[in-house]
Each structure stands twice: as structure tokens, then as C-alpha cells.
Image (cartoon, coloured by chain):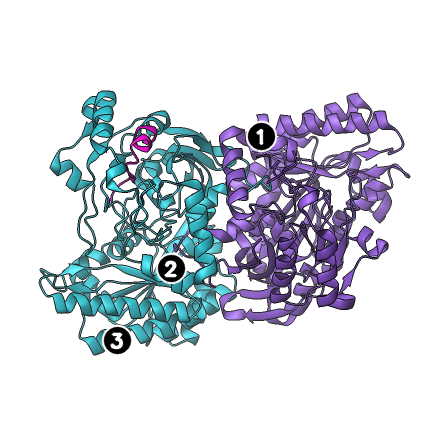
Chain colours: A purple, B cyan
């Protein structure tokens, strides 16, 4: 069998035309080859070139996804799952062509089990849509990556976000998934019990697999009780290091902080300007505490003492709902606020994650590089997890600058890995970070990943060109 | 290549004698074929027949484990990892012979990273040994399955126990593992960052794999701060149903209960007699609350209100350390207390797990069966997880009774699965529960597990006969 160097089936063996015909016959106007639709289904949010698929299909059930995959499989045509398109690392691009499976018509909530604190949803629903539905149950789905991503996409990239320090990531909050495998078979990875020791953890194998093993179509998710009381706060610190030290002490003291976000002074300036706030323009922690009214008061008081010990303050408390909303809206708008720092430039968001004890050092070293290279690159971090984001603003008409930023990102990844960290804490590998996996994992571990990929998807039709180099 | 029906390499192809010679040459007196030693390295705690390995080797490093596996692999000789031997489902038996790798000389603590709340240990250390070492750090490793199991064994069976409702299971608390794969390669599944989206979650693939994919030799583990204040309580309820309803309401109210154990009246009687207590002999919840002094008071008060609402009480509080110790010692001794209920009989501990909303129904139906069959079979449950244990006491000289209990366990498993539960919440599959995996997972999912096993361990040398039927 002829295989190209990139591991995808040679184009000669493929029969894309025939596959598209069969999909049109079967799905009618729920199948599109319209150039605009195809373009919308490629990656739009990164510096990676947009690589549209050959066609987009809009299934409405797991069985229809299975049909699509079976049809694609007969022609060895790549299959790319598409949720909300909000990923940063080129996950939905089609570098080898193929069929984009758009799950946006699969938004049904199949069950809400309030007593069990779980629900079962189709993978196309977004987190805000789910939380809107849950409003009257007293429960919510806590994972909040900022964007209103689809839950299938969040599972595929093992997303997390501001709440992860308290509530975990998609890894901890997906109980089971239904997925269509490359042969069209439908697997459900686990039952709804909270825990199980019955067999391999296929749930966790699929969560974070970026569509390279199968297409997730349904998810059983953990829900959390909406906290009775919430308090938020903004606390300036003299340095990134003192802010990180305060967070370490907070976590060691078992204060169950629900969010703890670091904004560097560049981001604070941008946020002040964009959202009309007057936060102190030094490294800043934005925090949130969840609990009973008494519990939240106690957490707040104890954090205040710790912050003072590390030179932080004065703390601006946001007890009222509207102040809290304003604060977190400002945090979530940080992306757009930062974009304004350099009009006409493109933001290149990227993330790494290190053990929290190394976070300050890693952020500071990154800031030194930013200064040395003359970049505009604001930093925000989910400090409780050791995870931070850098968002260089790049003039995409300047190849030299692009190259500089590419090297800057590479250096940052190497720095994180050298500190026992990872090349991505929550964005995923996608296309751009494939090259760092060997450095991070080593030959033997990477080979094991490739072995699993080849066993499950021998023809490499599942999102080829993402996450793993597949050569044979 | 000749393969037997059970999927292990045909004995004719094996060269056990040569492998044992090479192991003796290499490991000298750290390799034993002594019948007593071999016997000690088979399963001792279940009704399953003891099946000793051909030899036992005592490595002292990951590299030595790799050497052993490579030597065994050349002769297609099975490899069985051995921790503390405390598993219930025959995990350490050697049904096809082979070499037991005893990790008890691998107890080193390689790193304690207090700021990161993690540590790195060799897999042979037990949880009590680790917690002893951690005592002065203010941190502890929370997973507590009762037995002083090795951490490698706990990872292999995805163990959990009384603390899981608050702290999670081994799935949530293992950050990374180092494992020796069937070809002798050493993989480290992840770096030490709290979260990562960089590739397949090999950590979770190995956790719970029961030694069928590789031998875990080192673990990076999450640690938790020792709570400032702890309160424990015993609260009787009129029925299993009302106890479960109180737990559901407690969890929905976001009370972060640290332990919540159900003892049925049979177990309470046994515990009273064995530990000299005077607990009310009805279904009973044993609880523990962790937090600040204020927080624990508030949790306790709120739980008290909920318990009353569901007819529970009066609550016996154990605020003093010695009372708490007595209470939890009694809970941990429940196994031995129950054994006393029928001298000369053998306990057959087994577990299932269901969504918590179905727990009362599942336990009640099980108790009806126990009564109908005239069994003595106490029940204890980790109610917050929907997980419960039944411990039938069986006269092993009576084949008819053995058969009755076997059918009883089978029916209980089917009941749990029909309630969207699992055949084992924390004991693992081992030998006895292999037959339930198809019912629980279905053909497609089971085939995917088998596909992964075959890809990773093509000669089926890793703990053959456990977890999955492997036929070709």
C-alpha cells in the first residue's frame, strides 16, 4: 500500500469524488461544498494558514456520524470533527483535504440527572447553552475556557480554563463519551457510575485525542452545585513572583479558591483601557471564592492575610453580582483588550504549563525575552494550575517578525519542558505544536502514542496531520 | 505462530527454563523459585484458587524491571507485577505460569515537591509508608482503600476508598507514571505539570490497566494539605434509602464531605461486637468533615439539619482525635469484624458501583436476595460515589453454597449494570470479573480495549488471563 511521507493514504488511493457523491446522495442539503462554508470550517484564529476541507456535512445523530465515517473510510478520505471552531492550534484545518463533520446540529440534552450531579448531552452543544439549560436545577457545568466552545471540542482538546484550580479540567469532568471510531463502530466508553475499575480508561484516552482516534458525539458530564455565595477580588502585587508565591501559600493552606488568574501589567493596562476599569497597573491576581456565606467570608479573610504577607494589596472586593460580572467580563475580554494594543496586528495565543513552583521563574524569563525581542505580548495565567498564556501581537505582513515570534514560542515551550512542564496546558497540540511532542515525551512514549493511533486508525483518516507525526 | 485459545503463547513456544536460568544468572538471590515464596506471590484473599508463578524476582530499579521484562519477552514468559498482594480479584495469580515481579524493594521516595503538592515515588511503597514520610510536610496522600496496599498496585487497579468522594480516586491523583512496556522500553507518561493537553493520556490508560499493558515502576502523585480541623460522626438512619437520600442532599448542597460510609445493620452489629462499640444497630452513616475549624463546624451543622430532615439521628460526634481514630479503626476493621460472623467461613469481598440515585434501590434489592438465599453477607458502601461492597461468608467445603454465592454475585453485577453502573467500582476486574466486561461495555467497546491490548502487548505476556479475554 502506497503511503505518503506524512502518513496519510496516498491521494491516488483515495476516492474523494466518489465519497462526496455518496454523501450528497445521503445528506442532500446537509452536505455542502460551498467555498464559503468550507472556509468557515477551517482554522481562523491562529497564524496558521486556513486549510478548508473538501466538504462539510451536518449530521443530527450519532448514527449519521457513523454513516459519514463509514462512507469516508471506504474512500480513505480524512474526517475532521468541527465544534465551534474556537481552537487556537489549527485543529479543524484540513491539510490533506477531507470531510468536516459539523456537530452544530447535535445540541440535544439527552438527560439531566440532578441527584447524580451529571448530564448527558450531544457533543455540539456549547458550554453556555448547557449552563442556560441548567439554570433552574441549581447545578452548573464549571469548565470555562473563555470562548463559548462546544463541549465536544472542549473534550477533544482536554480544555480547562479559569475554574480548573477548583473544579478540574475536562479530564476530570467527562464521565463517559460516545464516539464513532474510524471503522464506523459506535463505542460508549463507560457507564454513568462516578467511578469504575472495569477495564481500560477509554474515556480519558479519547478526551484530549483531538479527533485523531474517533469523533465524539455524546458526553456524560459531571455537574457541580451552584455555590450559595461567591466573592471576587482583584489584588495587585509588586511582582509576578510575589503573586505566584501568594497563590502557592493559598493552595497549601487548603483554601479552595475557585479561580485565581494572573494578569501581567501589560494586560492590566489593556484591560483598563478596553473595559474602562482602574485596576492598579502592576501584576494582578483576580480571584473568586465559592462556598457558603460564612465559608466565603473566611476564605476571603485568609487570602487577604496571605496576600499581605507577600506584599499584595490593597484588595478590591467585588461582593455585588454586577461588580463580579464586570470583573470577569474584563478578564474574558482580555483577549480583545490586548488585540487593541496593536491595531492591524494579529494575536497569536499560545500556552504552556509548568509545576506551580516554577511558574514565576518561567513567566519572568518569558517577559525578559519579550522585552529583548521588542514584542508586544501580554501574559495571563491560570496560576493555580501553573498554566499561562502569551498572546504576541504580530504584523503578519512582516515575515521576519513572524519568524521571530515563532522562535520565541519555541523557546518558551523548551523552557517550560525543561522545568518539567508541558508544551500546552489546555489549548492542545493541533498542527503547530506537533514538533514539540518528542522533546516533551521522549522517543519511547511518543512511539507508544503512535502505536495506539496506528492500531485504532490504521488508515489515518481521523484528523490527519494533527497531534502526532505518523510515519510508517 | 501457535496461539492457545486463551490467547497466551503456546507453551511449546515458550522457554521458561531458559528464562529462569537467565534471571538466576542476573539476579542471584534476588530471584527465587522457592515454593513458599511462589505461593506467597499468588492470590490469597479470594475464593479463587491460588496460582503461583514459576519464579519471583525482586528488582530494585526501573532499569532492572526492564531487564526482567526483556528476558521474559525473549521466552514469551508471562510477567505479573506484585505489590502488596492485597487485591481481591486474583490480580497476582499466574494462571499461565510466569515470573512475578515483586516491587517491595522499590520503596524510594524520589522527590517531594511541597510547593507543587506532589511527590514522585517508586511503585512498591505502600500508602501508609508514604504518609509516614510526609508527616512533617503538612501534606498527605488521601486515597485510602483500607488495606495498606502498594501505590503501584493501587494505580494498577484504579483504587479509591473512603476519601474518594472528596479527593477522587487514583485516576485523579496520579499525575504521571513510569512504566516498563512489554518490549522492555521505559516510558514516562507525562511531566509534572498539573494539567496538559499534549497528546494521549497514557497516564490514565495505564492507571487501571491491572498490569496488562506494562509494569508501573514510578508514580508522580498529587498530595493534599492536611486539613486544619477534622470532625467525624456516626448517624443512624431508619433505612438504607433514607441514608442515601441524606447523602444525595448533602452533596447537592455542596457540603464537601470528606468521607461518608454506609454500614448496613449486619455490619454495625459485627462492628459493635468486634470493636466494643455501641452504635445503633440500624443502617448507619459514618462521616468525616475536613476544613478550617469554622468550616468544619458549619459543615457539621448543615449535615445535621439534612440528616434530621431524612429521619436520621441522633448523631454521635467524634471531635476528639482518639474518638475519631476509634471510629475509623472500627470501619477499617469491618472486614475482620464481619469475618467473625461466621467462623470457618471464607469472606468473598466484591464490589459494584451505580449512579448514586440508584444506590438505595441497588442495595435494597441485594439485601432481599441475601435474605432469600439465606446468606450472611454484610454490606458497606462508599455512598458518596454510589459504590458498595458485599462480603458473603462462604463455607468453602460446600460446593452448592459456593455456586449459590457465585450466582448471587453475578446477579448483583447484572443489577448494577442494568442501573447504568459498573461491575467493579474499585476492586478491579482481575480473573473473576472478566466475564462481565462484555455485558458492561458491549461488543464494540470491548473490541477496542482488546485492540489496544494486542497492539501494546502482541505476545500477551503482561499479566495474561486478567481483565480481558484475549482470543485471536
Q: Residues within 10 Å of mark 1 (few under 14, many from 20)?
A: some
**Chain containing mark 3:** B
Question: Between tags 3 and 1, which lies in front?
Answer: 1
Q: Quadrant of residue A186?
A: bottom right
- Which mark, residue B369? 3
Both marks 3 and 1 on one chain: no
Residue B173 visible within the image: no
Give the SS element for disc 2: helix
Observer-nearest of B80 and A115: B80
Q: Quickly name the residue at label 1.
A: A438
> In the visual, does B227 lie left or right of B388?
right
Q: Residues within 10 Å of mark 2 (few under 14, many from 20)?
A: many
Q: Quadrant of residue A375?
A: top right
Give the SS element for disc 1: helix
Both marks 3 and 2 on one chain: yes
Question: Between tags 3 and 2, which lies in front?
Answer: 2
Give the SS element for disc 3: helix
Observer-nearest of A405 and B101: B101
In three-dimensional space, the C-alpha distance between marks 3 and 2, rounded to whole angstroms, equals 23 Å
Q: Give the percent coordinates (x, y) of residue A417.
A: 59, 29
Both marks 1 and 2 on one chain: no
Q: Are marks 3 and 2 in contact (CB under 8 Å)?
A: no
Judge whether A17 appears above or below A263 on screen.
below
Residue that appears at 61% across and 45% down: A460
Observer-nearest of B434 and A176: B434
**Chain containing mark 2:** B
Q: Quickly name the residue at label 2.
A: B437
Judge whether A97 appears above or below A356 on screen.
below
**Chain containing mark 1:** A
Residue B263 visible within the image: yes
Residues drawn in magenta: B69-85
Amino acid at each position: 500500500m502506497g503511503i505518503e511521507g506524512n502518513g496519510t493514504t496516498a491521494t491516488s488511493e483515495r476516492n474523494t469524488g466518489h465519497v462526496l457523491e455518496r454523501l450528497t446522495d445521503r445528506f442532500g442539503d446537509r452536505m455542502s461544498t460551498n467555498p464559503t462554508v468550507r472556509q468557515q470550517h477551517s482554522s481562523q484564529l491562529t497564524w496558521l494558514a486556513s486549510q478548508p476541507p473538501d466538504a462539510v456535512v451536518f449530521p443530527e445523530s450519532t448514527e449519521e456520524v457513523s454513516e459519514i465515517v463509514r462512507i469516508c473510510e471506504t474512500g480513505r478520505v480524512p474526517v475532521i470533527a468541527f465544534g465551534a471552531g474556537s481552537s487556537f492550534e489549527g485543529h479543524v484545518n484540513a491539510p490533506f483535504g477531507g470531510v468536516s463533520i459539523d456537530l452544530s446540529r447535535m445540541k440535544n440534552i439527552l438527560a439531566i440527572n440532578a441527584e447524580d450531579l451529571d448530564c448527558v448531552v450531544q457533543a455540539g452543544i456549547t458550554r453556555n447553552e448547557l449552563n442556560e439549560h441548567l439554570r433552574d436545577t441549581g447545578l452548573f457545568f464549571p469548565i470555562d475556557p473563555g470562548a463559548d466552545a462546544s463541549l465536544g471540542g472542549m473534550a477533544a482538546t482536554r480544555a480547562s480554563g479559569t475554574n480548573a484550580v477548583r473544579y478540574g479540567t475536562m479530564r476530570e469532568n467527562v464521565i463517559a463519551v460516545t464516539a464513532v471510531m474510524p471503522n464506523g463502530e459506535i463505542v460508549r466508553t463507560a457507564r454513568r457510575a462516578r467511578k469504575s475499575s472495569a477495564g481500560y480508561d477509554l474515556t480519558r484516552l479519547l478526551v484530549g485525542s483531538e479527533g485523531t482516534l474517533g469523533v465524539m458525539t455524546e458526553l456524560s458530564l459531571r455537574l457541580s452545585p451552584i455555590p450559595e455565595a461567591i466573592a471576587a477580588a482583584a489584588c495587585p502585587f509588586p511582582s509576578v513572583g510575589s503573586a505566584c508565591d501568594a497563590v502557592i501559600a493559598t493552595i497549601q493552606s487548603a483554601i479552595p479558591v475557585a479561580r485565581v488568574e494572573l494578569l501581567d501589567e501589560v494586560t492590566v493596562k489593556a484591560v483598563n483601557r478596553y473595559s474602562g476599569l482602574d485596576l492598579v497597573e502592576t501584576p494582578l491576581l483576580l480571584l473568586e471564592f465559592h462556598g457558603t456565606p460564612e465559608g466565603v467570608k473566611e476564605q476571603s479573610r485568609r487570602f487577604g492575610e496571605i496576600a499581605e504577607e507577600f506584599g499584595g494589596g490593597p484588595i478590591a472586593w467585588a461582593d455585588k453580582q454586577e461588580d463580579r460580572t464586570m470583573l470577569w467580563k474584563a478578564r474574558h475580554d482580555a483577549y480583545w483588550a490586548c488585540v487593541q494594543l496593536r491595531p492591524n496586528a494579529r494575536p497569536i495565543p499560545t500556552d504552556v504549563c509548568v509545576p506551580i513552583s516554577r511558574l514565576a521563574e518561567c513567566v519572568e524569563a518569558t517577559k525578559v525575552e519579550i522585552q529583548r525581542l521588542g514584542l508586544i505580548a501580554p501574559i495571563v495565567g491560570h496560576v493555580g494550575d501553573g498554566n499561562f498564556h502569551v498572546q504576541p501581537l504580530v504584523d503578519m505582513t512582516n515575515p521576519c517578525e513572524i519568524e521571530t515570534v515563532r522562535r520565541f514560542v519555541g523557546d518558551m515551550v523548551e523552557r517550560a519542558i525543561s522545568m518539567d512542564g508541558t508544551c500546552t496546558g489546555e489549548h492542545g497540540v493541533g498542527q503547530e505544536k506537533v514538533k514539540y511532542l518528542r522533546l516533551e515525551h521522549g522517543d519511547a512514549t511518543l512511539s507508544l502514542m503512535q502505536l495506539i493511533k496506528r492500531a485504532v486508525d490504521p488508515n489515518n483518516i481521523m484528523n490527519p496531520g494533527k497531534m502526532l507525526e505518523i510515519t510508517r
